[in-house]
Amino acid sequence: MDQELALAISMSGRSALLTGAAGTGKTHLLNTFIAQARKRGKKVSVTATTGLAATHLGGNTIHSWSGIGVSDHLPNNFFERLSKTRRDVISKTDVLIIDEISMLHDFRLDMIG
């Protein structure tokens, strides 16, 4: 699939999984998508499973963004215990990007969802 088609699919508002070998332009495509989505007024939260990957996209780790840190489970009333600022960021997000998602444990993805 070419980058134009991948960008069109991503801009359609549907969930998408972008894969490819190193050097094929995934980060470039994501940066293009982020810029276009924000230009259209979407609140895009950019995250990754590692700090290095997050810096390549100008984002945060998913652990930091969601407030879960390195926890293996969520305490009671987790969302209410988050700062108002963190709750607002999460609640107002239209698009959540998680780069390097294959490195995220399934139970942590469930915690975020």
Image (cartoon, helix red, strand yellow):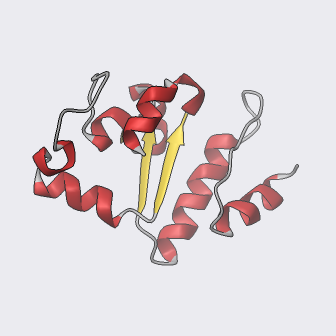
38, above or below 10, in the image: below
Residue 33, given in percent of the width and then of the height, sits at 60, 60
92, above or below 26, in the image: below
Residue 72, given in percent of the width and then of the height, sits at 32, 21
64, above or below 77, in the image: above
Pick the residue in front: 49 or 112. 112
Q: Is residue 83 left or right of residue 65?
A: left
Q: Is residue 91 left or right of residue 36?
A: left
- Residue at image coords 77%, 37%: 24
Q: Is residue 108 left or right of residue 65?
A: right
Q: Which quarter of the figure has residue 61?
A: top left
Kindly give the residue lying farthest to the bottom in the view shown. Answer: 40
Kindly give the residue lying farthest to the right in the view shown. Answer: 1
Q: Is residue 26 left or right of residue 88?
A: right
Residue 63, given in percent of the width and then of the height, sits at 33, 33
- Residue at image coords 46%, 71%: 42
Residue 108, given in percent of the width and then of the height, sits at 42, 30
The number of callouts visible is: 0
- Residue at image coords 61%, 58%: 32
Q: Which quarter of the figure has residue 15?
A: bottom right
